[in-house]
Amino acid sequence: MSSMHWSFKRSFLATTVFSIFCSGVGFAQTGPVMLSSPDQQLAMQFTTITEKGAASSEGKLVYSVTFHGKQLLDASALALELTNQPALGSNVQIVESTPGKGSDDYALIAGKAGKVHDQYNKIELRVVENSGPKRTLLIEARAYNDGIAFRYVLPEQDAIKELRLKQEDTEFRISTDATTWALELPNYRSSYESEYVKLPISAFSNQGGVSSNFLIGLPLLLHSPGTAWMALTEADLEGNAGMYVTNPSGNWAGHWFVSKLSPRIDDPSLALSTTLPYHSAWRVLLVADQPGKLMESNIITDLNSPNRVRDTSWIQPGKASWNWWAGDIGPDGKSAFTTKNMEYYVDFAAKSGFPYMLLDAGWADGRDITKLRGNVDVPELVRYAATKHVKVWIWLYSVSVMDQMKEAFPLYEKWGVAGVKIDFVNRDDQEGIKFYYDVAREAAAHHLMVDFHGASKPWGIERTYPNVLSYEAVLGAENNKVGRRDSPVDRSVFPFTRMIAGPLDYTPGGFNNVTEDGFVARDQSPMIMGTRAQQLALYVVFQTPFQMVSDSPQAYANQPAFKFIHDVPTQWDSMHVINGEPGEFVTIARSHGQEWYLGSTTNWTPRELRVPLDFLGAGHYVAEIYEDAPDAALHPQHVTIRKQVVTKGEKLTLKLASGGGCAIRFIPQHSN
């Protein structure tokens, strides 16, 4: 038990809590246990209820949530299904509650903010069964001003010699049939590359007596009009399996979800096989009045273990030239996957001031990632890049990494490789999650940064291992090459859904911009739906520490709009969501040093937005504005570039074309 600390300071008096220490038989808690956020607006209640739903000193363990005094979650069950044992949580009493408070203070190399300070109130419940082996369960919960989190804890005990967890039965009984933006997935072995659909919770129910199940990936965005915006997700998955949710209600009136843990591949009847002590991942419900506030929250990283990498000086976010999306096009306009042609992309990165070049798939000898295929000499490419002050990342197949990372990573360090893009992970079962941590740890030991592609959603591992820079878990621009449509509608959903959980690898920067009707999927000179100004704006809207500059060097030649891509950073000190609605539009401002950057995008609906510049500091700023040209709806490649002196408190009018956007760099005037 030394690795887990269940002791809490008893100084928290923010809410009325009764605590009775019990030993032996013990006595039940005298009333519901309450936990409130520091600002008192978000409250969580734990109690036990009988089968008929009445509160009782013993029975089924449940929790509920209110926001601004309004019911958000009704009584929702908390239970664990163990092999060959009754569910733990169905017949229990709360015997002890220990309150406390704390704050999260830490720095992030590549997060939403450079420095984080979040206060919270907390409580630990000790729950004991009323009969049988008298198993003990702890519930640890925290309440922040922008969300709640809780997790299961099983201390060492004679009644559970080995933990074989079949399933976690955590309910999320939303008080109303809220609107959701849900990521429907086909199974537990996907790349999370799917679209978010907008549907009420009841649309996912098992209706009409016909067996049906919708497997929903996280994060899940919900809106209960008049009550709150919410995002359901999880944090700190170390030692666990990824969580999904499904609606098991079976009727039109059923508007609730229950957790589903990704099953083990070797034994699908199990989610986890481990020893005690054990704690689950944190179940997180972000809550706010406006959807943009969910994006600004740092709760996900708050709940993860502190940085385990002592020397982080080598971890440097940055942009990269990329050979794959452009089809390996060389200076002669022909496709060639050769060392010489890849040097062309290195030259482009050097000329553009980018620190990196990403060498994509095809260099390794089949699945042996320690041997070269013979077409691209990776060590030679790395040596050439070093003469240009550029570093090289390389693409890897996840299965090969699972088999060979112990020998491959030291080899890459010897070659001088800067980072690895690991693709087609396609799993988040117990062993799959272990793979993420193994990769992060081994990569850090050999000074390798990591981009997980074809991966699960983020859960905050980038705080623990800051060499993990990005995850890809949504449709992206690269899908346009194979015909899967990535449109301005998708790009207006992702910031409110997928990006809530953490950084994403989306790959913007396509300059062959076309209308929706003019789009054709193709491998060479791929098209991108929406305007060029929107592609620029995505470099600010999306949080991507390892950022692709996707198109070919020729596509950017003599294009004035490319200057914004050259200038925009990938590492941020703070962010501010100015406005937006999921699937409609969004405007985000981010700071880097004394400069600010703004990105605004819309779906296929043209918009005129009035944007207050309250985020700026004192003094005058030169706003370098890249906006849709007047004819951008018909000619999406057309961008108007202008400068304007602005000050804090003023408002800018942004005119976004259909599928359009606007990107702005704000430079303090004294620094010009």
Image: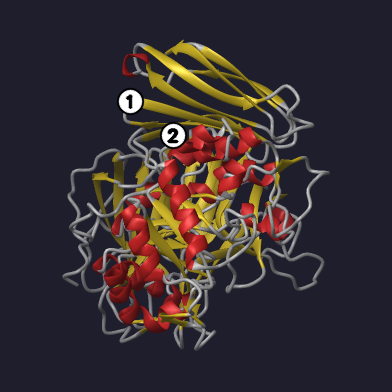
Where 294 sits versus 153, above or below? above
Structural distance between the alpha carbons of marks 2 and 1: 14 Å
> For the point 35% across and 54% down, which residue is it?
141
Q: Point out the residue furthest to the front here.
A: 332
Q: Which mark is residue 567?
A: 2
In this rendered view, identify the residue nearer to me: 501 or 136.
501
Residue type highlighted by circle 2: Asp
Give the x, y percent position of residue 505: 51, 54
Q: Which residue is mark 1?
A: 594
In this rendered view, identify the residue nearer to me: 537 or 218.
537
Crowdedness of circle 1 by 10 Å Cα count: few (<14), some, many (20+)?
Answer: few
Give the x, y percent position of residue 55: 48, 56
Q: How is the image coloured?
A: secondary structure
Q: Is residue 52 visible?
A: no
Where 668 sits versus 438, above or below? above
Image label count: 2
In this rendered view, identify the residue nearer to me: 164 or 562.
562
Choose top left, top right, bottom left or bottom right for residue 238. Answer: bottom left
Give the x, y percent position of residue 71: 54, 42
Whether residue 264 sits left or right of residue 109 in the image: it is right
Q: Is residue 611 visible?
A: yes
Give the x, y percent position of residue 390: 36, 53
Residue type highlighted by circle 1: Gln
Crowdedness of circle 2 by 10 Å Cα count: few (<14), some, many (20+)?
Answer: few
Q: Secondary structure at mark 2?
A: helix
Query: Nearer the N terminus, badge 2 or badge 1?
Result: 2
Q: Secondary structure at mark 1?
A: loop
Whether residue 473 sits left or right of residue 79 in the image: it is right
Eye-nearest disc, 2 or 1: 2
In this rendered view, identify the residue nearer to me: 355 or 243.
355
Where 213 sits versus 309, above or below? below
Choose top left, top right, bottom left or bottom right for residue 666. Answer: top left
